[in-house]
Amino acid sequence: MLDFGGGAGRDAIRALARSLLGVDVTSDAEAVRAAAAQALSSGVVASDDAVFLNDLLNLPQPTDLRHIYEAMDAGTRSRGQLDLVARILDRQSRQRPRVLVVEDLHWADRLVLMQLARLTTAVAQCPALLIMTSRIEGDPLDETWRAQVSGASLTTIDLGPLPRDDARALAEALIAANTAFAEGCVGQRQPALPFYRPGQADRSAVSCRSPALRNQQRPPPASF
């Protein structure tokens, strides 16, 4: 799980871009610069998109691109980021199918929902799957949002919680047979947030829950 939202360069699109390029939000600056260089040299990212790549990875703009970046307004930068992520996803998924997972949509703000609408339309054009999870209460994917992605195929699955014994058995198997900790996870889980098991495809996962909220809300159950 990649946490974001509590610091510079830690929003949904940046977190997914980093994951698609093989780095995460905790990678050091050297690893991020190496991933950017590899993306450019391999053709995953075109040289014309370098300014948006630096922005996505929270890297400083080189001198020859700084004036271009500074001349852009916020809308242009945002659209450039989203378009670049769509192109990265298209190129990477054609090498190997991708699964993108965005969890806790009930915490998402309007910007994140707009970004996810763009990502949803991009996923519809390439061998990738986008999985988004939300509590039933507060589900933000309403008719207005769905109208923005009318060209994409959407499937909604309402998941109920596992029976307690099954949830305990699953938790114990995934948490190194730590029975006490597993029991705590089962005891804290909420009905709208069942345990689930990951698939076998390459998986990039982020959560829409800001770390800043964790001190104010009861922690959600562990996801695996």
Image (cartoon, rainbow, N blue to C red):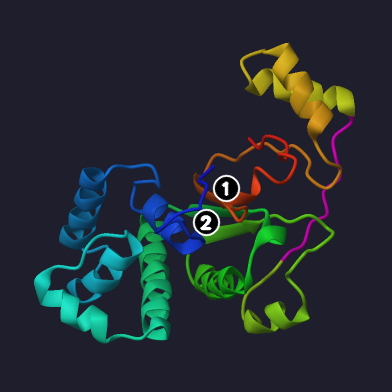
Magenta part, dominant SS? loop
Q: Is residue 67 above or below residue 140?
A: below
Q: Which residue, as the protein is rendered here, is positioned at the far right?
A: 163
Measured as percent of width and height from the top left, residue 126 is found at: 47, 67
Measured as percent of width and height from the top left, residue 69 is found at: 25, 79
Q: At 62% across and 39% down in the image, what residue appears?
A: 198
Residue at the spot of label 1 = 211
Q: Residues within 10 Å of mark 1 (few under 14, many from 20)?
A: some
Amino acid under disc 2: Gly
Q: At 56% across and 73% down in the image, what residue appears?
A: 111
Camera-nearest residue between 152 and 120: 120
Residue 127 visible to the viewer: no
Q: Quadrant of the N terminus?
A: top right
Measured as percent of width and height from the top left, residue 28 is found at: 28, 42
Residue 57 falls left or right of residue 195: left
Q: Which residues are magenta?
A: 155-163
Q: Is residue 142 above or below residue 60?
A: below
Residue at the spot of label 2 = 5
Magenta highlight on residue 98 = no
Mark carried by residue 138: none
